[in-house]
Image: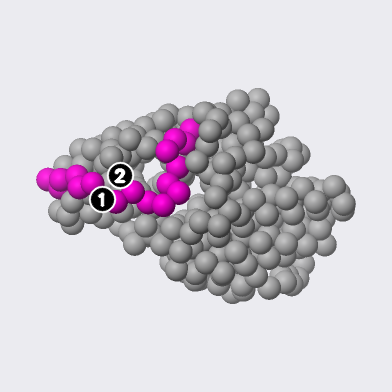
Amino acid sequence: MGFERAVVTGGAGFLGSHVCEALLKRGTAVTCVDDFRTGSRDNVPAGVGVVVADVGKPLDLLGPVDLVMHLACPASPVDYLRDPVGTMKSGGLGTLHALELAKTKGARIVVASTSEVYGDPLEHPQKESYWGNVNPIGPRSVYDEAKRFGEALTCAFRREYGTNTGIVRIFNTYGPRMRTDDGRMIPTFFDQALSGEPLTVHGDGSQTRSLCHVDDLVRGLIAMAHSDHPGPINLGNPEEVTVLEVARRVVEATGSSSEIRHVEPMEDDPRRRRPDISLAREVLGWEPRIDLAEGLRRSFDRLLVG
């Protein structure tokens, strides 16, 4: 079963633009809703309709909609630390308005949550049943708690109104269209390596991440859209690697002569991060296909060709 018309909030962002592209290829008419605070018009694929709007305000779209992909929210530390209140509005009120749109249109809605709801996890790897270890008042809490609130609100809409909802918890994702000033690890390392600057690793670099290439992640999101599962379902790559090793691999992939420099640890930076994707395998038949070495090669190749 395909979708006739999808609305993608945050469709001009890194992940949203790839989702727009994937839906278009499947024959779906796609409308991108974005205010371009962190996204770019250049990211929006040709053939996608654009509605310039802030999801922090009610969404009033004409015509039928049978799928809402709610991806709008600043996701990079640079963005959400610069605009903390706006981040909470996008993650909180934005989710409310996306859910109201889906409820009104009778559409399936997939709400993008995050592995950050697990905080600095005491359980490893993280299953969907884990409630997390989050600092609710730290600087990162504007993103973490907005997403946790968004999950609670999504579940409330499903229980009270019968809205066809699904929640995905997205782990670290990388690939083409990430901004070099985004502040997240992979684009920062690539930018530093290609500029010949030292790659800055926070702390001793022993903290781990599980990095999923965007092509794999989008397959999981589309599979979730076509399911009727409420979630939450983890989407991420269970290949766990230290931040220091990621820096070394980026240097190798780019052929850079850059050194690695250790800087002060980030506040509330999770020590370990790795998804248990058993549920995604069982329910969606999904798992990543692209390992980190291949993903970095693909990302570097795209940088070279622009």
Q: Name the residue rendered at 47%, 30% in the picture.
A: 238
Q: Name the residue rendered at 64%, 28% in the picture.
A: 279
Q: Name the residue rendered at 85%, 47% in the picture.
A: 159
Residue at mark 1 to residue at mark 2: CA–CA distance: 6 Å
- Circle 2: residue type: Gly
Residue under pointer 2: 203
Above or below, comparing residue 255 to residue 45 in the picture: above
Count the marks: 2
Mark 2, secondary structure of its residue: loop
Residue 300 visible from this viewpoint: no
> Where's residue 132, x and y in %?
60, 40
Mark 1, secondary structure of its residue: strand
> Where's residue 273, x and y in %?
47, 36
Would residue 22 be counted in the magenta stretch?
A: no
Q: Quadrant of residue 10?
A: bottom right
Residue range (magenta):
256-274
